[in-house]
Image (cartoon, rainbow, N blue to C red):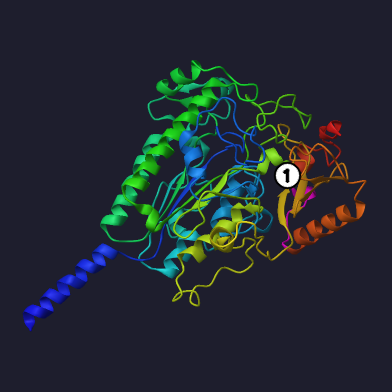
Amino acid sequence: MKFFLLILSLASILCIKVLGDKSPNFIFILTDDQGWNSLSSAINPEFPDAKSDYHKTPNMDRLIKMGVNFTDGYAASPVCSPSRYSIQFGKSPARLKKTIVRGKSKVDHNQVGIAQLLKSINKNYLCAHLGKWHIDADPSDYGYDIHDGITKNKEGNFHHNDHQLQWGGYAEEDPKRVNSLTDRTIAFISKAIDENRPFYVQLSHYAVHSDLVYSTESFAEMILDKPGKIHSNTSYAAMIMDLDKSIGNLLNTYEKLDLGRNTYIIFTSDNGGMPVLPIQVNRGKPYKNGFNSPLVRGKWDLMEGGIRVPFHISGPGIISEQTSNTPVIGYDLLPTIVELAQSSKTKDEVFLPKELDGVSLVEVLKTDTSLSPKRPHDGIIFHFPHYNIVGLNEPHSAIRIGDHKLVKFYSSKRSLLFDLSVDISERKDLFLKQKLLASSLESKLDEYLIEVGAEIPEESFTWEKNGQNGKVKTQFFERY
């Protein structure tokens, strides 16, 4: 009998080791300043030409075909830090009081984030954040066991006051840390597997934010190709190639370890791409040749070029090789990850934070890619109450409900209305033709911003200094 019990005990241990912890794993790849049209394949098959005419991204192309690829995926902000806060806490930048990178922070950092919620589902989760953090509190405060600390742009080779270093381009062996970050991610995954623990790893790349840093091999390859009409910067293209190669190494590990059975992959960017290269001060005037074409403008603005980004989720049970036109946004990731991590046993035990703006996308991912999840507030809302001379140079907010998007400008006291289903480039302002709809969208936008106590333009440090108490108007309306 003792021998039998010993054999049974050993068999049980072996079974546990083989089956492992059934809680799913998550690999979240977050890139920096990566535009919607920056890949060598189109995000939206309905716009086959909406892709790079120069960049080579075979691995990112491969990734977005694995699961559900969202054509209308958005970053919560047109700038990096607010977007990253929004992802971690499932709330809009307006609600979080974090809408700009510079200036005094008004955020209450007593928040509950993704890693903490996963550990409330299963205390054995091993969580890591590698790369750019850009939140003004330590990652360990939010449940990350392994992390790089409070990292920002500087840790990724950023020289704010040196125009030549930023935009001239230069070579390094580990450009933008893409190789070492990926190697460390793979090592972390191996560690979690060896310890038989479910894992969550957020790989937050510094690429493709400036400086333009690349490997000599990628630069040599790109310089032999003919530059495109939209994308022609060889240094930037080489940096994109290095990022893509590193993602390819991670995907190879994913497949080699057969992680697809129990591991989700999320891929998106923190905001849209640069509107032009190198940076230009144009105070909102239309660019002749936009870097994000067919989307208008880019980073720092709430036009589509500044907020529409690659957005992909794949993994066990998720519909494969499908495209969804459902509008989704970065603050949807927290409730989505939580629901994917929950089993029938834990669904009644895990409590999401109050006042979330995000909604779970699980039904869209696993049942019907055409569904539109019901949100706590109508539509998705963006808020940038600041002046920025390299952007639209006027405080503005936006709301999208269905196919319609309204952009409200505070100094000019004017709003623009677009139907994105037929006007992805936001060329035709429908405000005068559809005043009732525009008025409804304006009201919903205003109601939400009031409800969450969002910062108003007059409270922003840029209102008086850069905007001369709101007297400065954007030059963007020359487009219309």
Residue under the image location 26 percent in, 56 percent down? 194
Q: Is residue 109 visible?
A: no
Residue under the image location 75 percent in, 64 percent down? 451
Between 97 and 331, the one nearer to me in the picture: 331
Between 370 and 425, the one nearer to me in the picture: 370
Name the secondary structure under disc 1: helix
Q: Position of residue 124 (x, y in %)?
A: 35, 65
Please determine whether, in this image, residue 291 is positioned above or below residue 82: above
| Residue type, mark 1 in image | Phe
Between 42 and 205, the one nearer to me in the picture: 42
Q: Position of residue 14 (x, y in %)?
A: 20, 66
Q: Is residue 88 visible?
A: yes
Which residue is denoted by mark 1 in the rendering?
461
Residue under the image location 43 percent in, 60 percent down? 143
Magenta-tinted stretch:
452-460
Please determine whether, in this image, residue 41 is positioned above or below residue 105: above
Q: Position of residue 378 (x, y in %)?
A: 74, 61
User: Is 456 a magenta residue?
Assistant: yes
Q: Position of residue 459 (x, y in %)?
A: 76, 50
Please determine whether, in this image, residue 223 is positioned above or below residue 385: above
Q: Name the quadrant containing residue 246.
A: top left
Predominant secondary structure, magenta span: loop
For mark 1, does the 10 Å Cα neighbourhood hold few (<14), some (14 to 19), or many (20 or more) residues? some
